[in-house]
Structures are given as C-alpha cells and as structure tokens.
Amino acid sequence: MKKNINFMVLFFLIVFFIREFHVANRKSITCDETVHIPAGYFYVKKGDFYINFEHPPFSKTLSGIFLLSTKIVFPEDLYKSLRMNEWNLGMAFFYLNRDNVDKIVLLSRLPVILLGILLGFYIYLWTSDLYGKIAGIFSLFLFTFCPNFLAHSCLVTTDVPFTLFFIMTLYFLWKFFEKDEIKYLIFSGFSFGLSLSTKFTGIILMPFILIILIILEKKLQKKEYLKFFILYLFLLPVFILLFTYRFQGILKPFEKKVFTTHDKVFYTYKYYGIGNFILGLKKIIFETTERGHFSYLNGKFSQHGWRYYFIFAFLYKTPIPLIILILLSIFIKPRIDKRERFIILPCIIYFIFASLSKKQIGIRYILPFYSLLYVYSGRLLVYSEKLRLKELTKKIIFIISLLWYLFESIKIHPHYIAYFNQIAGGPDNGWKHLIDSNIDWGQDLKELKQYLQKEGNPELLLNYFGTILPETYGLIYEPFLYPFFIYNVPEKNFHFNSSFPEKEYLAISVNHLVVLPYEDTEILNWLKKIKPKKKIGYSIFVYDITKDIKIREKMKELFEKYGFKKQAERQKNIIEKLKSHLNEKNLSYKKTS
C-alpha cells in the first residue's frame, strides 16, 4: 500500500512537471516577466536590488542563478542609463538577446516549476497528516490538474513561490503545536523568512495570521515558549530577509543627496540592499490601500476594485466540479475540528484581505486561498459517511466530479491563463467578465507568429498587450492604435504595410479590445461585434481585413481622429481600390448576365 501511495504521489508530480515544462517552452514572455527575469539576473550578477524593488528578491534571484551559464548581452552603459526605468530595461534586455530569448525564458522559469512541484508535495503532506494518505492523494490530484496553478507555476512571478512558503509556514507551525517539537518551529520560521523575501504580502499578512493562531493555541501562556517564538518566528525570518539582500544597507539603507539648480533645491535618494525592501513596502502599501489599480469586472472598470471582485473571480475561474467538491467538503461536516483551524482561519483572513485591497487584477492574488481549500477538501474522504445518500450515489457523484475536473484541465491545455468555467461562458467569453492576468498577459505572441507562418505570412496590423517589443519574436507589423507607439514613437517611425496588400490581418489583444489602456471606453465597441477569424490562446483575436471594407473604414476613422495621417491615408487608398474592384466585378457580372 505504501509503495502504491508513493508511486501515485510521484506520478502526479511528474505529470505536473511535464505539462508545466511544455507550457513554459511554448508561451511567450508575460508582462511581469519582462521585469522579473532581468531583475533576477542583475541581482545575481551585480547585487543591484533597485530593479523591481516593489517585490522582494528571493524567487527572482533563483531564476537569475539558472541564467548564469547562459550568454547574455547587455552593455554596461545601457544598463546604467536604463536602470531607473525597469520596463525599458526589460524591453531592451530581451530585444538585445532575441536570438537566445527562448532559452533564457525557459531556464528562468524552471526554478518556479520546481517550487510549484514542492507546493503540491506540501499540500499532499498536510492533507495526509490531517485526513490520511488517500485524502492526501485526492488533494494532490486537485492541485495537479488545477488550471490556475498550471497557469502560474511556470512563470517568473512571485505568486506561486509565495504560496509555497505561505503553506510551509502554516504547516510547520501546525506541526509544532501537534508534536511540541522545536524543530518544526524552526522550519516554520525559516519558511516565514522565505515568504517575507518573496512577496510583501508576507510582512503585511503573515504576522497577523501567526499571532491569531498562537493566541488560539494559548502557547504564549507558557513563558518558556515566548523566547522560542521571538527567536524563530521573528529573528530567524529577519535574518533570512537580510541574507537575500546580501546584508546590504543594514547600517545605511539609503543615501540622501542635495543639489541646487537655478536657486531651487532638489533631493535624490540612493537605496542600498534592505533599503529597497523598505521602499518597495511603502509603494505596495500605497497601491493596496490608496491608489489602487485599474480593474475590470463584468463590463465595468474601477480604479479601486470591488469588495466582491474575488467572489466573482472564484466563480468564473474555478472548475465547476471543484466548486461542487469544495461545497461538499464544507457541508458534509460544518463543525470545524480544532486541528482544522490552521486551515480555515488563514483561508478566511486571506480572502478578506484580498477583497479589501484596492489592487485587484487577477485570480493569482488568491492562490494561497486555493491551496488551503485543497487541503481542507481532503476531509471529504474522511467524513463521506455523513452524506445522507446511498453509497452508490456518492460514488457516482465523486467519480463524475473527478472526471469532469480532469476533462476541464486537459481541454484547456496549454492555455491555462485563459481558463474560465461554464458560468462565465468558457474561455471564449471570459474576456467579457475579467481581463488582465485572468486571460491576457501577453503570453501568446509566439503562437501568433506560428499561426501567421501557417497562413502564409500575411501582412499584419498589430495591437498587442505586452511589455516586450514584438520584434523580439521576429514579428514585422504596422501598429494599430498600439498604446506603446501612441505615447512614445512618432508615426513617421512606424513600419507601414504595403499600399495594397495581397493578404492582411489585424491582430488585437483582448485587454486592448476591452479598452483597458484607453480613456475612450467605446473606442473599439464596433470590433467586439465582429467574429474573429482566429483566437490565439483566447488572448489575441485575429481578423482577416484583406477585403473587408467595413473594418477598414472604421480603422480609417480612428486613425483620422487620433492624428495618424499616413495610416488614415493608406486605408483610404485601399478602400478606394477595393470599391473600384467591387464595381468592376459588378459591372462584369451585369454584362455576362
């Protein structure tokens, strides 16, 4: 029996790795990776932690270590000039290394995949300790085929690494209270330090959760435990945090410089090591409590989000069979056992915290919530006898739910970011409800390139949501109301397609189709009503505009409205030629008839 259990654990983790490796190799650079990958590389090479200071460095540093054996070109003078603008630095980093970009991206994603596998193992471990080995396999199955974890466990972001360290912190603290062995408190403190070194959510949220759990367990009533909590849940995590910054900036976190110009006094600050942590923490607190982030839900936009955003995100992005299994695990035994408080309390607190935040841009923000639910779902196998149903009926419900869940996961492969369930109308209609990293994070540029090659390389008008230059993947295109070009590059520097193309496609990212970056929220309403020729990974819509006069007339209007005179003139000439050809055909048809 033990051998069979171990085999199943290994099998599920290998399946997870194979699928993630395939996705990591297939998908293009996502938005945050444009910054995270170069940041990790320069952390390792230069020890410069200013780049992407809004996230602590640990997980990015791991990716940077995996790039040490790779040849990367980036001139020192360019690094110095772009260091203060991480997005321009990221674009330049990948463009200069475009011949090697696939290798760089794949290698940097590998450590995140490994951390994802470790997360699956700890979900299995905790569930097994609570409800038994079979329940552990069940929870591991739920994790292995979860579209949301498959979407983000192969990307160089902080979401999955933080979720791992979040779960490890709680699991080892739970083990300490169960076994009363100091080694588990040390492991918990170590994991807590890694969570602080990965994402600022750790410092904002984890102490709150830990204090509640400690008070509930009343361990603080024993004075001999107090020193252990201070040592291992405070000093040890702080030491690990300082270690990730190479102990830089402990005595001097920043340096203030004063200079005068035209009788005006200016101040600049240079941050060192841990000073960047303080700077990033201030920025994140400001974003989550005051400034917010542009969010989209069910056709509406908000700068500060909605308290119910993640309720809808959960209902849209969670496979329906999983929702059924979670509800069954809750109602099968509503009373929470003492041992389950370490799951339920953090689960509730985390979800409330995310819902109160003014930065709501993706389901990835509540991945720790999902992890805890997977552990909790293991109770379904222990308390199944409490369901007042016939044994055969229980088995049928359970088997159908598992097969349905498996089918949902396999069907969406490899487009996991764009997964939506039937409540949202599936991935084809997900963009009507949620956008940003819920469906379109710039991940399908490589697949667009491959599709165009299959179509005979038609000329391309492109509006791409991403933070790299499409030229990085060898795309040649004329920009269509592309925000990057609108704000940075004059029209005279555009590449223009031929005056009368034999074949021309328009490709637009879903985020831009929903007008995420535009002040005029109705600018592309007309295009939403037109069925695309092809959907690339559900995130890029492609239209054949070669002979489509209506689309070209709409494009001409927009080009004129926003001052793109050459592009408007080009469309005008093409429309005239198309109408002329159409008139000639009609005339020829009348003569023959």
Image (cartoon, rainbow, N blue to C red):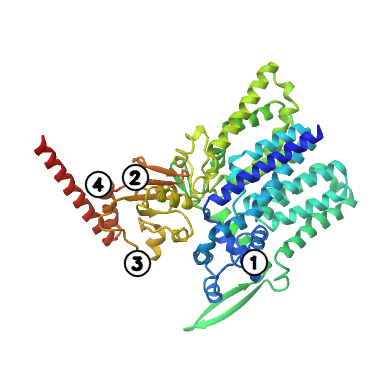
Q: How far across and down, in percent of the image, does residue 390 sit? A: 69, 15
Q: Which residue is mark 4?
A: 549
Circle 3 residues within 10 Å: few <14, some 14–19, many ≥20: few
Q: CA distance from mark 4 to mark 1?
A: 52 Å
Say whether residue 213 is visible: yes
- In this rendering, the answer to whether 257 lies above or below 327 is below
Q: Are circles 4 and 1 on residues that touch, CB within 8 Å?
A: no
Find out whether the residues at labels 4 and 3 contact each other: C-beta distance under 8 Å. no
Q: Secondary structure at mark 2?
A: helix
Using the numbered discs, state the Cα–Cα distance from disc 4 to disc 2 in whole angstroms.
13 Å
Q: Is residue 371 left or right of residue 95?
A: right
Q: Secondary structure at mark 3?
A: helix
Query: Which marked residue is nearer to the observer: mark 2 or mark 3?
Result: 3
Quadrant of the snapshot with the C terminus: top left
Q: Secondary structure under badge 4? A: helix
Of the numbered discs 4 and 3, the one sitting upstream in the chain is 3
Per the image, the residue denoted by label 1 is 43
Q: Check residue 527 in the rendering and tell me which mark sits there, or answer none.
A: 2
State which mark lies toward you, 4 or 1. 4
For the residues bearing labels 2 and 3, Cβ distance under 8 angstroms: no
Q: Quadrant of residue 149?
A: top right
Q: Earlier in the sequence, mark 4 or mark 2?
A: 2
Tell me the amino acid under the disc marked 4.
Answer: Ile
Circle 1: element type: helix
Lower position in the chain sequence, tag 2 or tag 3 = 3
Q: Residue furthest left?
A: 591
Q: Nearer the viewer, residue 66 or 255?
A: 66
Distance of label 1 from label 3 (alpha carbons)? 35 Å
Q: Are marks 4 and 2 in contact (CB under 8 Å)?
A: no
- Name the residue beneath numbered marker 3: 493
